Image (spheres, helix red, strand yellow):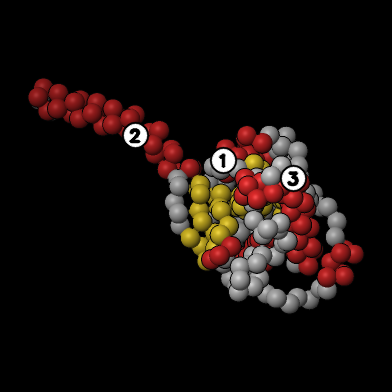
């Protein structure tokens, strides 16, 4: 190999190395925080089940220990429908809302769901679909944001309720804040009862760093509730 060949090789290596250094931050971002817009249409939710509402109320408990097994897409579909699904032709949802102004957006931090890649997803009630917000498993980051509560990191999924107060306060003024908090309770109980009817476990979590959770989800709303869900 002559001097000129060696010189060319060195120049090419320097150029490639420089390009990789410049691209590295963007490559990392795409692998973990890509804003995709990819839609996943969820299975049609069931309107009947094997457990009555009376049984679900009697059996409902806060559960913080889950098996290391995935949920099915049908189970996730049912949970999200119970939380904020459309239940009538005029757009009414599964949980009562003042107005109805529907101040909540539902996000799901997916770790283990059969047929789904880990990531942060946004639920779209009108389409009964999930939109990918960020790729990657963010359960550990969410656990840290929830002050280290380990059941958040070990759950198959974490459902997060995010409030946009202005949707309700622009109609009801300051009292709308109270209505938003009431609605959070309605949605939360629906998640509890649906999880119970499916033989799954969940627990309502309100202790977390609001800004850290919002950053993980990529939202400018106010996170109010986190519901880890897993198999018993």
Relative image position of residue 99 (x, y in whole percent):
68, 58
Image mark for residue 220: 1
Q: Nearer the viewer, residue 232 or 142?
A: 142
Mark in the foreground, 3 or 2? 3
CA distance separating discs 1 and 2 = 28 Å
Q: In the rendered image, is residue 32 in sight?
A: yes
Marks 1/3 in contact by CB < 8 Å: the verdict is no
Mark 3 or 2 closer to N-term?
2
SS category of the residue bearing label 2: helix
Compared across the picture, whether 85 is left or right of 96 comes to left
Residue labelled with disc 2: 23
Q: SS of the residue at dot 1? A: loop
Left or right: 79 in relation to 51:
left
Check the picture and name the quadrant holding the C terminus. Answer: bottom right
Q: Is residue 197 above or below residue 104?
A: below
Q: Residue at x 54, y 42 (%)?
A: 218
Instruction: In this rendered view, identify the residue nearer to me: 65 or 172.
Output: 172
Q: Quadrant of residue 200?
A: bottom right
Residue indicated by mark 3: 175
Q: How many marks?
A: 3
Residue positioned 73% across, 61% down in the render: 96
Q: Residue at x 87, y 70 (%)?
A: 54
Can residue 65 be seen in this snapshot?
A: no
Tell me: residue 159, above or below residue 219: below
Tell me whether the residue at label 1 lies in contact with that at label 2, contact meaning CB atoms closer than 8 angstroms. Answer: no
Picture coordinates of residue 81 (x, y %)?
66, 65
Q: CA distance from mark 1 to mark 3?
A: 22 Å
């Amino acid at each position: 190999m002559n001097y000129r060949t060696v010189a060319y090789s060195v120049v090419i290596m320097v150029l490639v190395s420089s390009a990789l250094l410049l691209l590295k931050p963007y490559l990392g971002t795409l692998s973990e925080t890509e804003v995709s817009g990819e839609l996943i249409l969820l299975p049609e939710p069931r309107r009947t089940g094997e457990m009555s509402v009376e049984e679900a109320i009697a059996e409902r408990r806060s559960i913080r220990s889950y098996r290391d097994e995935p949920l099915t897409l049908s189970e996730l579909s049912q949970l999200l429908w119970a939380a904020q699904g459309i239940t009538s032709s005029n757009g009414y949802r599964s949980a009562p809302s003042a107005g109805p102004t529907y101040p909540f957006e539902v996000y799901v931090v997916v770790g283990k769901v059969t047929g789904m890649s880990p990531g942060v997803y946004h639920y779209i009630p009108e389409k009964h679909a999930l939109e990918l917000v960020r790729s990657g498993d963010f359960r550990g980051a969410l656990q840290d944001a929830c002050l280290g509560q380990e059941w958040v990191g070990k759950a198959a999924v974490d459902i997060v309720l995010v409030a946009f107060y202005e949707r309700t306060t622009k109609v009801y003024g300051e009292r709308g804040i109270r209505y938003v908090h009431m609605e959070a309770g309605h949605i939360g109980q629906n998640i509890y009862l649906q999880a119970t009817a499916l033989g799954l476990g969940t627990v309502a979590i309100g202790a977390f760093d609001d800004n850290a959770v919002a950053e993980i989800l990529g939202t400018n709303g106010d996170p109010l509730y986190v519901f880890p869900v897993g198999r018993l």
